[in-house]
Image: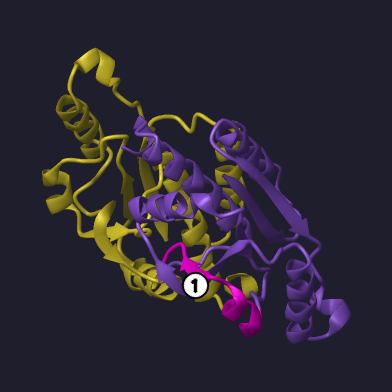
Chain colours: A purple, B yellow
């Protein structure tokens, strides 16, 4: 299984990079996973959040291929439990690549939401887009453990 | 506002301790917050998850006073969005202390669930009890930002 996560902005905090590295290391035997960090656009420079979203979404699109199955993380998306999320990944294992998109501070545009194959919500709670990275990667790891019948998810 | 988080087991990962310290530092001007880490019991030594739960819950109880308002994190608990969570904390600000309980690997017993004033679910997704610490602390910080009308939650 090939997974690409597209996120906006650097990790910023050392602890986040360390946590992501830890899960990426653990995921190595189960899938080929990478995280593409798109540069975030400053609202101070552009003057409007609309332009920030436009520019960031354009950069995100460049990292997606036609054959990719795109899952956009969005607070209004469908919610799943960990079992359901694992089943989703299993169902998608025949796809060439699964792409998860985590927007920036201002989220993504309506077009990207339409273009995505699924919009998924991690929780009713709002997380920063950086904490969302960790939650997503931990859930991917959990999904792999559930799929392979290992004990981590208990 | 006084907040005590009771969690089972050490942080284990350095990145988690760093992340928690970061949020605790940021929370300092807004509330008095502490995390009590109860030693986790090994199922290998006790031979049964039931005994683990019993012993851990007994240790948790020792950290709770009669006047505390207890919120138990439980996957079957009530779910809230960040706005709702912030309103809950605001409503509880007259209480002597708010206590959040995060159980261990096997969760908590039915008695502790009954004794708690509220059972709260962070998400339909299951998180490890360690990742739950970070999510909770981040949500408490977010709640304080919402309450004080600051920009973090946008």
Does residue A115 belong to the magenta stretch?
yes
Identify the image quadrant of residue A88.
bottom left
For residue B11, side relative to residue B87 (left or right): right
- Can you see residue B150? no
Does residue B85 belong to the magenta stretch?
no
Q: Residue at x 50, y 29 (%)?
A: B12
The local secondary structure at tag 1 comes to strand
Q: Residue at x 55, y 70 (%)?
A: B145
Q: Residue at x 68, y 60 (%)?
A: A7
* Badge 1 density bin: few <14, some 14–19, many ≥20, Cα 10 Å: some
The residue under label 1 is A75
Q: Which stretch is magenta? A: A109-123
Identify the image quadrant of residue A27.
top right
Residue B109 screen position, x and y as percent: 16, 41
Check the image and name the residue furthest to the top: B45
Mark 1 chain: A
Nearer the observer, A87 or A107:
A87
Q: Tell how many labels.
A: 1
Residue B103 screen position, x and y as percent: 30, 41
Nearer the observer, B17 or A125:
A125
């Amino acid at each position: 299984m090939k997974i690409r996560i597209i996120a906006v902005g650097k990790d910023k905090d050392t602890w986040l990079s360390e946590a992501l590295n830890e899960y990426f290391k653990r995921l190595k035997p189960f899938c080929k996973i990478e995280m593409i960090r798109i540069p975030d656009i400053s609202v101070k420079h552009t003057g409007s959040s609309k332009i920030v979203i436009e520019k960031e979404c354009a950069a995100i699109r460049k990292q997606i291929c036609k054959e990719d199955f795109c899952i956009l993380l969005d607070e209004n998306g469908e919610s799943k439990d960990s079992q359901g999320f694992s089943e989703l990944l299993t169902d998608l294992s025949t796809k060439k690549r699964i792409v998860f998109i985590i927007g920036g501070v201002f989220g993504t545009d309506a077009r990207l939401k339409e273009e995505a194959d699924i919009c998924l919500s991690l929780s009713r709670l709002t997380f920063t887009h950086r904490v969302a990275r960790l939650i997503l990667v931990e859930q991917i790891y959990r999904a792999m453990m559930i799929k392979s019948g290992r004990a981590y998810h208990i």
